[in-house]
Amino acid sequence: MSKFWSEVTKHTEPYVPGEQPQSTSIIKLNTNENPYPPSPKVLKAIKQLVNGDLRLYPSPTAADLKLTAAKYFGVNEKQVFVGNGSDEVLAFSFLGFFNPGEEIFFPDITYSFYPVYANLYGLNYREVPLAEDFTIPVEQFFNSPGGVIFPNPNAPTGLALSLDQVEQILQHNREKVVIVDEAYIDFGGESATALIPKYENLLVIQTLSKSRSLAGMRIGLALGNEQLIEGLERIKNSFNSYTLDRLALVAGKAAIEDVNYFNETREKIINTRERVAKELKDLSFHVLESKTNFLFIRHGTVPSQLIYEKLKEQGIYIRYFNKNRIDQFVRVTIGTDEEMDTFIKAIKQIIGK
Ligand code: PMP
């Protein structure tokens, strides 16, 4: 180990992503991707571009994509930031809006990238414990000294706060930035974008990875007050003025424009989720009420780690978190109906039903 190793690791405890096996024969229910392909209009836009202008730099302002997103969300284009997946938007937001020495609040069971960014930027943070029933205890997020970030719906629990509850958090944090990470909002939650005109400290982050089937493209969005968005632009331009490539710019635009396809596929996923949740309950699983494209479940007697391992042996990948309190659960992404039938069949075998 070189003497510089402690310098290298001082601020970095990297996020460990879910497994990404590359074989196509497995059933992949472990990283909340959409089981349906992107809209045919996205594929058409990409094909056109591949034959066109890839030799040219992309637009540094992403103006077309921003305008499309602004129209969709009912804001103006200066209230939209786009980044390389919402992970990058989150990274820039932590850097821009939270300050060392001012404690920020986020839930203790949540997206595990938050402590990674906080450590990287030397921020103080309080991991606010979830309630006994895994809901976010709203009052515990009041009056944070440095700002607040939480996913709505939360991950990996899948539970959502109502818009009213989100607004309570905003009302009690007027001085610092409140970030609502809405990666899974399109599967049944109430978006805080409606509150943007009322709260200049609200930043809503969304992604095209889940409900628009574009995880492979890496497109994330932030929506909020013009000055917050300008702050993010300055940070982005301090690293790389061309955040999104040309393919992502046209794909993102086409995906947001094809509202019919978006509604069709997300409704299919919601219906499958509700059916599978019921089947699992009938098999003695405890199933948290999901507003996402995944289910967080625990069996009455069979340990979660065993379920995870047995499924993996059969080529079905789900997510197991070896972490206090949630190690009794597994998280299962909603796949196609066919995939979920195979999953349920395998589960029945494992639990002996
Ligand atoms: N936020 C949450 C809560 C997530 O679960 C994820 C997906 N892992 C992300 C953000 C990041 O998504 P992406 O970078 O693909 O936009």
Image (cartoon, rainbow, N blue to C red):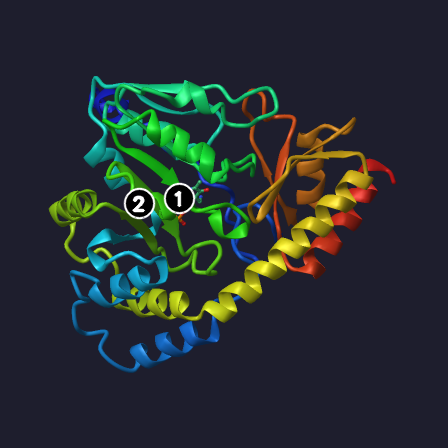
Q: Image point 44% across, 20% down: which residue? A: 139
In front of the other: 218 or 234: 234
Residue 75 image point, x, y percent:
28, 56
Do the CB atoms of the residues marked 1 and 2 lie less than 8 Å apart? yes
Q: Give the structural element (helix, strand or loop) at label 1.
A: helix
| Helix, strand or loop under label 2 | loop
Q: Position of residue 326 (x, y in %)?
A: 59, 26
Which residue ends up furthest to the right in the rendered image?
353
Q: Is residue 36 visible?
A: no
Q: Amino acid at mark 1?
A: Ala
Neighbor class of circle 1 (other Cα within 10 Å; few <14, some 14-19, many 20+) is many
Q: Which residue is mark 2?
A: 196
Q: For this view, does 36 lie left or right of residue 143?
A: right
- Name which quarter of the figure residue 135 lies in: top right
Q: Quadrant of residue 225?
A: top left
Q: Quadrant of ligand 1?
A: top left
For image coordinates 37% across by 38% down, the residue present is 180
Q: Mark 1 = which residue? A: 192
| Quadrant in which the C terminus is drawn | top right
